Image: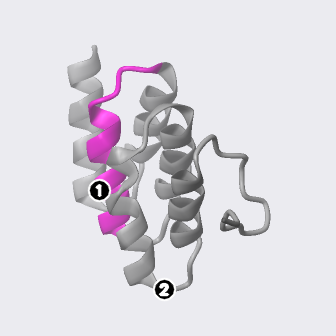
Amino acid sequence: QKRPSVPGMPDFAKPRSAELYTKLCSSNVEEQRAGSRDIAFILGDDQMILLQKAVTMGDESIRINAAKILSRKKTPDAKALLEKLTSDPNETVRSMAEKALVMLK
């Protein structure tokens, strides 16, 4: 089975992660959202790579989902992404990131 791929795609440990990344890179918002909903089920470094992509997405529901997942992680990379989200244009994303950072202290 051929792995899905898009230009500049990171090297994922699992084909499923690559599949979700391809969805996130889709020009179709429904595809992007479908991909973002499954990030929670991906483990390890692959999940962080997907989250790094998700926090840059234009659709706020995807960034909200990323903030939810990040708020449950206690790693320095998760904290760095949450800090990035505290300046998000969407108020819900900002407040979720701020609350998560308070909880991590």
Residue 19: x percent and y percent? Answer: 55, 63
State the quadrant of the N terminus: bottom right
Looking at marks 2 and 1 on the same chain, the residue that comes earlier in the sequence is marked by 2
Residue 73 colored in magenta in the image: yes
| CB contact under 8 Å: marks 2 and 1 | no
Name the residue rendered at 59%, 54% in the picture.
Answer: 15
Kindly tell me whether residue 89 is visible in this rendering: no
**Mark 1: amino acid:** Ile
Q: Position of residue 29 (x, y in %)?
A: 42, 81
Q: Amino acid at mark 2?
A: Asn
- Whether residue 85 sits left or right of residue 48 in the image: it is left
For the point 58% across and 46% down, the residue is: 14
Q: Residue furthest bottom?
A: 28
Instruction: Give the CA distance from mark 2 to mark 1.
Output: 18 Å
Q: Residue at x 41, y 46 (%)?
A: 85
Taking the spot 44% from the left edge, 20% from the top edge, the residue there is 75
Q: Residues within 10 Å of mark 1 (few under 14, many from 20)?
A: many
Q: Which residue is mark 1?
A: 64
Figure label count: 2
Q: Is residue 26 magenta-colored? A: no
Against 20, residue 87 (above or below) is above
Which residues, given as a range, are shown in magenta? 60-75
